[in-house]
Amino acid sequence: MLLDDWVKNEKLKVHMKQVGHLMKVFATLKGFDDLTVQKWYLAGLLHDADWDQWPEQHCKRIIGELEAREIDPEVIRAIASHGPRYFGVEPEHEIDKMLYAFDELSGFVHAYSLMRPEGYTGMEVKGVKKRLKDKTFAAQVSREDIADASSRAGIPVEELIQFVISNQGAADLG
Ligand SMILES: [Fe+2]
Ligand SMILES: [Fe+2]
């Protein structure tokens, strides 16, 4: 499968599976039909597929591949817009906005879970927010993108954080 063929970095695979899981749960809770839920899952699962081998071509390479495979254009568009400051494609549809919103936050909350002995258990929004204010913690995660994505999605950062805390621990990483 494309994910395993293209991505050798285990940490990146975990990230992609976690974002895929969040997208799937969000779409399911919204009551979307199975096909739509699958699209949301796929967009999350594959959004960084080219980052491992071709970081300078991110995310052109994966878009080209998915187009060649005739994957649903909604999935491709979501992937193309997951970093509007970098890729020049604006998140427009809900699937685009939620992928952008979950991307950085998912990685950030995961990093936080790894430094907590209890992982996700007992994690609180205020703990995550405290780490967000500490610019040295997971410094590569853009706080600006997190705030921008939250405002575009129309969902407060606190709510997004709570959603990630509540659901990310159950992601299937196999
Ligand atoms: Fe990315
Ligand atoms: Fe990502």
Image: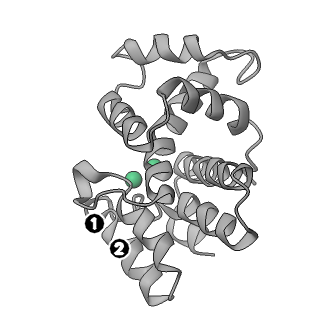
Q: Residues within 10 Å of mark 1 (few under 14, many from 20)?
A: few
Q: Say the numbered circle drawn on residue 57.
A: 1
In the picture, the quarter occupied by the N terminus is bottom right
Q: Amino acid at mark 2?
A: Arg
Residue 50: which quarter of the image?
bottom left
Q: Residue at x 31, y 71 (%)?
A: 60
The residue wearing badge 2 is 61
Q: Amino acid at mark 1?
A: Gln
Q: Residue at x 43, y 48 (%)?
A: 100
Q: Residue at x 53, y 23 (%)?
A: 158
Q: Position of residue 101 (x, y in %)?
A: 46, 43
Q: Secondary structure at mark 1?
A: helix
Q: Is residue 91 above or below residue 76?
A: above
Badge 2 vs badge 1, beta-carbon distance below 8 Å: yes
Q: Position of residue 65 (x, y in %)?
A: 43, 81
- Residue 156 shown left or right of residue 143 in the figure: right
Q: Is residue 118 above or below residue 1?
A: above
Q: Is residue 60 above or below residue 161?
A: below
Q: Nearer the viewer, residue 50 or 77?
A: 77
- Residue 163 shown left or right of residue 97 in the figure: right
Q: Secondary structure at mark 2?
A: helix
Q: Nearer the viewer, residue 154 or 101?
A: 154
Q: Is residue 140 visible?
A: no
